[in-house]
Image (cartoon, grey):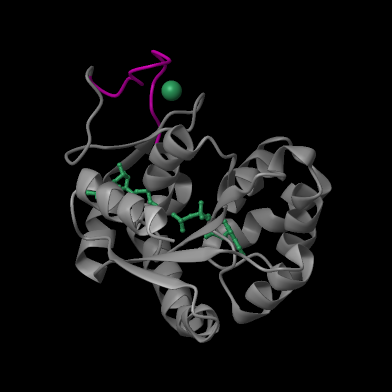
């Protein structure tokens, strides 16, 4: 199954992806995670992407699409994937359809209110080792600021500060409706409220997938 998780920053795409990969046994592709690793490793792509990410702007379509095109060639994706963070623009949605030939199967839209995403992003803390997302109040780790699995200290993403969050939301508002329309017109858009508890969201998504 070729599944896309779409929604504003902080909607819970990464959190749901982690739950879904356990259930569906499919690889998780997060363009944000790939880009952060490119920045960390100071690759050519990382050097080009860094300033956009720090400012809460989108990395140019051409760079991200080339990155996705390469990733999609990998044989581990023969049974499908869960793609999180791409496409974010209409041009990216069109490019993905070309890359995949038959297109995707379903786009899950986590519709989440602005107030909720701001609270989630500013409280988000991430494990540097396994990438699990925690939240200071919504989903705290068992021990103060330490990953439950890896026992290493969590960190706050540099782009999860209030000013950058504002930019990211503005970008989302500008670009999202064209992407939603794109999948709606294909009859592939599934609408789920992202404001609900993580477990509830997961149950709703699971039912939608089972009914496909
Ligand atoms: P995204 O990948 O869409 O940016 P994340 O999955 O990283 O979102 O979630 C953003 C933050 O909100 C994280 O700190 C996460 O722990 C928390 N979170 C995710 N889903 C929920 C939920 N349904 N209810 C409350 N908090 C959530
Ligand atoms: P979130 O879901 O919290 O917004 P991501 O981890 O998906 O964050 O993305 C972090 C940053 O990486 C984005 O703000 C953007 O700069 C860049 N990025 C990720 N995916 C894309 C994409 N598909 N197109 C352009 N930029 C992207
Ligand atoms: Zn961890």
Q: Is residue 177 above or below residue 44?
A: below
- Whether 153 is among the magenta residues is yes
Figure quadrant, ligand 2 = bottom right
Q: Report the front residue among 98 and 165.
A: 98
| Relative horizontal placement of residue 87, taking residue 134 as reference (left or right) | right
- Whether 42 is among the magenta residues is no
Q: Report the front residue among 23 and 58.
A: 23
Q: Report the front residue among 86 and 186.
A: 186
Where is residue 189 shown, x and y percent of the image?
44, 73
Q: Is residue 209 above or below residue 99?
A: above
Q: Which residues are magenta?
A: 144-155
Q: Report the front residue among 169 and 54.
A: 169
Q: Quarter of the image holding residue 166? A: bottom left
Where is residue 153 shown, x and y percent of the image?
39, 21
- Taking the spot 41% from the left edge, 80% from the top edge, the residue there is 173
Q: Quarter of the image holding residue 59? A: bottom right
| Relative horizontal placement of residue 71, taking residue 134 as reference (left or right) | right
Q: Main secondary structure of the magenta part?
A: loop
Q: Residue furthest top?
A: 151
Where is residue 80 shown, x and y percent of the image?
63, 48
Q: Quarter of the image holding residue 100? A: bottom right
């Amino acid at each position: 199954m070729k599944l896309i998780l779409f929604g504003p920053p902080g909607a819970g795409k990464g959190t749901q992806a982690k739950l879904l990969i356990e259930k569906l046994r499919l690889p998780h592709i997060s363009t944000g995670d790939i880009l952060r690793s490119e920045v960390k490793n100071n690759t050519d792509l990382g050097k080009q992407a860094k300033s956009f990410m720090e400012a809460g702007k989108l990395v140019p379509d051409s760079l991200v699409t080339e990155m996705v095109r390469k990733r999609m060639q990998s044989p581990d994706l023969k049974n499908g994937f869960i793609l999180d963070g791409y496409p974010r623009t209409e041009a990216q949605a069109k490019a993905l359809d070309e890359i995949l030939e038959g297109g995707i199967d379903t786009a899950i839209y986590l519709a989440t209110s602005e107030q909720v995403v701001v609270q989630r992003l500013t409280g988000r803390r991430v494990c540097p080792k396994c990438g699990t997302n925690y939240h200071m109040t919504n989903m705290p780790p068992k021990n103060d600021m330490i990953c439950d699995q890896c026992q290493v200290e969590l960190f706050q993403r540099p782009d999860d500060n209030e000013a950058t969050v504002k930019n990211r939301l503005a970008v989302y508002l500008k670009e999202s409706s064209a992407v939603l329309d794109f999948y709606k017109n294909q009859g592939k858009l599934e609408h789920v409220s992202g404001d609900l508890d993580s477990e509830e969201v997961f149950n709703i998504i699971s039912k939608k997938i089972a009914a496909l």
